[in-house]
């Protein structure tokens, strides 16, 4: 790390430099987003909100993501630091806002780690049922003790691979990502072939109207669709948290983030068009609008579309969730590493494995937290687990929004110096950040309704609101405790503000 950055309080943390190139970073970024897992879960609910305007909504959701990605890229070019949102918001807005930005990232990723493990377990037993032709094996995931035990094994394996460093992470990801993209491509080609041959369930011709977001029936449906589409792009910022371990750390992570988002939107558009063309949006049979199909659209369509090769889709979703489970460990571990390194968390979080050059204590802490979160929510109430996943969108918008606006504020002195600076350092992150923070407050307001999410409520307030705000308030409490235990950071003595 150069002397200019060191003067501002930034410093290296002992991670293995140069371990990942542009292609490796993009592969890990795509893996973290988990396209096969995300699509099977998100296609149905989004269709139920916006119908054939699914491609339009996917494109609208892409806009704030690419705008925010531009801001992340500029911040990384100026300050390549593994703490990303935490470090950058601290430099722009001071230690308190920086700490909450870091907390938003950690909380969101740990929550999704537990969900990814749960999905991987469900598809693991479904794959066994298909492989051995025994439907009873698929039901084993409903056995609570066995489900919890298997989930903890998945979390432990992912944690172990991540602990072994970025090169081990990258090697696993190449195989798993390539496989899921191959199967998604196979599915799309097969679906379009059925349409061309007249064997599709409800062959529907692609229309320009599908790409018109203004054709959506109501603003509430539009907002719900955009909220879902923002979630499906989440995870590209993992490429930035690897910045101290990439080749050319000032440039490669930002480029990888942009490429990742573009690759993902191409995948999503292709599969969305194939699904709508084959199945239509009807509410009966194989229709994408059928409520019975919406929890996992590929589980329903893979057989009719891919025939005897349908088991490959189950394997792809299993590998997608397992790959994302493993790559998602990268972000919280490195954020906690940075927070420990800069004295915002206990010093042990700032330790790096001498052998693997990875955040050893922080990686294990993320695994333990994800495991504990899953066990507590799964044994308390299944609704609590899924409502927390719904509340996840609030945290994503929260810390992405803070980071985007940190870009605007940090570069304010020379944002108008050139046309490029105006767009990438001011306009793009400003628009992206405002859109996401508006979505944050709208989701918070909507989720106060007890009917939001699973329909659970406490004291007349929706469970999603209670969980979402509860996690953010928990961060405030921990921050206040840390301000007493580690006052140097909170007094601004570690990371200097300004640019």
Image (spheres, rainbow, N blue to C red):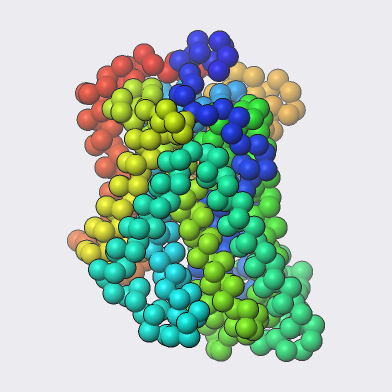
User: Who is closer to the viewer here, 378 or 433?
Assistant: 378
Q: Residue at x 47, y 50 (%)?
A: 326
User: Who is closer to the viewer here, 213 or 468?
Assistant: 468
Q: Residue at x 37, y 27 (%)?
A: 350
Q: Residue at x 56, y 76 (%)?
A: 311
- Most extreme residue toward the front, as rendered? 355
What x and y, as percent, mark residue 211? 71, 65
What x and y, as percent, mark residue 492? 37, 16
User: Who is closer to the viewer here, 275 or 118?
Assistant: 118
The answer to whether residue 421 is left or right of residue 479 is right
Q: Residue at x 74, y 83 (%)?
A: 194
The answer to whether residue 145 is left or right of residue 137 is left
In this rendering, the answer to whether 314 lies above or below 234 is below
Viewer can see residue 124: yes
Query: How many marks on residues?
Result: 0
In this rendering, the answer to whether 184 lies above or below 297 is above
What x and y, as percent, mark residue 312? 59, 72
In this rendering, the answer to whether 293 lies above or below 91 is below
Viewer can see residue 56: no
- Most extreme residue toward the left, as rendered? 459
Q: Quadrant of the N terminus?
A: top right
What x and y, as percent, mark residue 345? 31, 29
Q: Quadrant of the C terminus?
A: top right
The answer to whether residue 452 is left or right of residue 85 is left
């Amino acid at each position: 790390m150069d002397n200019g950055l060191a003067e501002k309080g930034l410093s290296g943390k002992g991670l293995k430099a140069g371990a990942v190139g542009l292609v490796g970073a993009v592969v890990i970024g795509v893996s973290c987003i988990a396209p096969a897992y995300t699509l099977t879960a998100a296609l149905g609910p989004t269709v139920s909100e916006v119908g054939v305007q699914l491609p339009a909504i996917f494109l609208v959701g892409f806009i704030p993501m690419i705008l925010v990605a531009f801001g992340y890229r500029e911040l990384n070019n100026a300050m390549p630091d593994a703490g990303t949102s935490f470090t950058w918001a601290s430099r722009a807005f001071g230690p308190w806002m920086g700490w909450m930005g870091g907390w938003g990232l950690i909380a969101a990723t740990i929550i999704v780690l537990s969900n990814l493990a749960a999905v991987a377990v469900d598809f693991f037993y479904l794959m066994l049922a298909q492989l051995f032709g025994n439907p009873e094996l698929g039901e084993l995931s409903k056995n609570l003790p066995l489900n919890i035990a298997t989930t903890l094994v998945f979390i432990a394996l992912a944690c172990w691979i991540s602990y072994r460093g970025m090169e081990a992470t990258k090697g696993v990801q190449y195989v798993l990502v390539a496989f899921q993209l191959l199967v998604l491509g196979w599915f799309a080609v097969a679906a379009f072939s059925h349409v061309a041959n007249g064997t599709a369930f409800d062959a529907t011709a692609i229309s320009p109207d599908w790409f018109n977001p203004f054709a959506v029936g109501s603003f509430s449906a539009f907002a719900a669709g955009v909220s879902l589409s923002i979630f499906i792009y989440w995870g590209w910022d993992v490429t930035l948290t690897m910045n101290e371990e990439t080749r050319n750390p000032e440039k490669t992570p930002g480029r990888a983030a942009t490429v990742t988002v573009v690759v993902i939107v191409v995948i999503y558009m292709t599969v969305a068009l194939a699904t709508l063309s084959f199945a239509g949006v009807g509410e009966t049979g194989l229709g994408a609008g059928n409520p019975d199909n919406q929890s996992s659209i590929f589980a329903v369509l893979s057989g009719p579309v891919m025939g005897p090769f349908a088991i490959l889709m189950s394997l792809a979703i299993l590998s997608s969730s397992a790959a994302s489970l493993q790559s998602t460990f990268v972000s919280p571990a490195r954020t906690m590493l940075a927070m420990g390194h800069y004295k915002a968390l206990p010093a042990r979080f700032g330790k790096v494995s001498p052998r693997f050059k990875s955040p050893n204590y922080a990686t294990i802490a993320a695994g333990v937290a994800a495991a504990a979160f899953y066990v507590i929510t799964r044994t308390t109430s299944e609704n609590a687990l899924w409502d927390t996943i719904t509340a996840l969108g609030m945290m994503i918008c929260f810390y992405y929004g803070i980071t985007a606006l940190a870009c605007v504020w940090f570069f304010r002195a020379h944002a108008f110096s050139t046309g490029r600076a105006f767009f990438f350092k001011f306009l793009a992150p400003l628009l992206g950040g405002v859109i996401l923070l508006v979505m944050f407050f709208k989701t918070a307001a909507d989720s106060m309704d007890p009917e939001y999410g699973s329909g659970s409520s406490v004291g007349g307030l929706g469970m999603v609101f209670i969980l979402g705000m509860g996690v953010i308030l928990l961060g405030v409490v921990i921050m206040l405790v840390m301000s007493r235990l580690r006052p140097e950071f909170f007094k601004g003595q570690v990371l200097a503000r300004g640019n």
